Amino acid sequence: MAYWNSRGLRGSQLEENINISNKIYFEQGLAVVQKIPTSIKPVELDPGKGTIRLAYFEEKSTVDYLGNVQGIPICFDAKETSQKSLPIANIHEHQMEFMKAFQKQDGLSFLIVHFKFCDDIYLLPFEQLNTFWINAQKEGRKSIPYAAFDKSYQIHSCHNILVHYLPALNQYLTRKD
């Protein structure tokens, strides 16, 4: 059972920026995408501060975000790395299973990956992720190198939309069709 303490899970800057972007998408009628909370069970409380000091995850989460973009169901997870590659170990088997099942229901699954070393953000389609995942399970490479990310799926900010992923998603849809 995984445990959490108050020093962890403070929320990444990437997720905060995605949340702000999704709020703007909603307000502009472009998409309805919500962060899926991870349920925790408090074990130890700090009565003086009214905060949780120790907790454990009640169940495995699926992905970070679920929603609909102009009639297209989407699910995605946000990942950050300081390295020049995304470790496959950062992606859990239950997340892969969920994204695969989501794809089978005609939804789109992907990752949004932030490379901190260069401050680049990319959309990684499930099909490409799955190829790396399968190879890693067969004792292949255990990470996805920065160079493997398609530059046409790079995500930029635009005005007040900090993680403007809809253009990259549109590019992916255009190629997919």
Image (tube, rainbow, N blue to C red):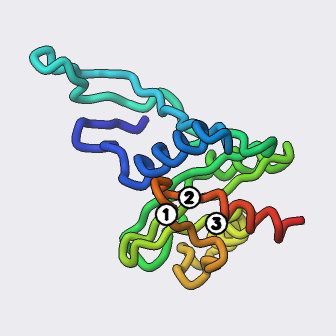
**Which-is-in-front pick, marks 3 and 1?**
1
Mark 3–mark 2 distance (CA, rounded to whole Å): 14 Å
Label 2 CA crowd tier, 10 Å (few <14, some 14–19, many 20+): many
Q: Are marks 1 and 2 in contact (CB under 8 Å)?
A: yes
| Amino acid type of the residue tagged 1 in the rendering | Ser
Give the residue at x 26% y 29%. Answer: 54
**Residue at image mark 3:** 124
Mark 1–mark 2 distance (CA, rounded to whole Å): 5 Å
Q: Position of residue 105 (x, y in %)?
A: 85, 43
Q: Secondary structure at mark 2?
A: strand
Label 1 CA crowd tier, 10 Å (few <14, some 14–19, many 20+): few
**Residue 64 visible to an observer of this rendering:** no
**Residue at image mark 2:** 164
Nearer to us in this view, 6 or 13: 13
Nearer to us in this view, 29 or 95: 29
Give the residue at x 68% y 44%. Answer: 30
Residue, far left:
48
Label 3 CA crowd tier, 10 Å (few <14, some 14–19, many 20+): many
Q: Position of residue 70 (x, y in %)?
A: 77, 44
Q: Are marks 3 and 2 in contact (CB under 8 Å)?
A: no
**Residue at image mark 1:** 157
15 to the left or right of 47:
right
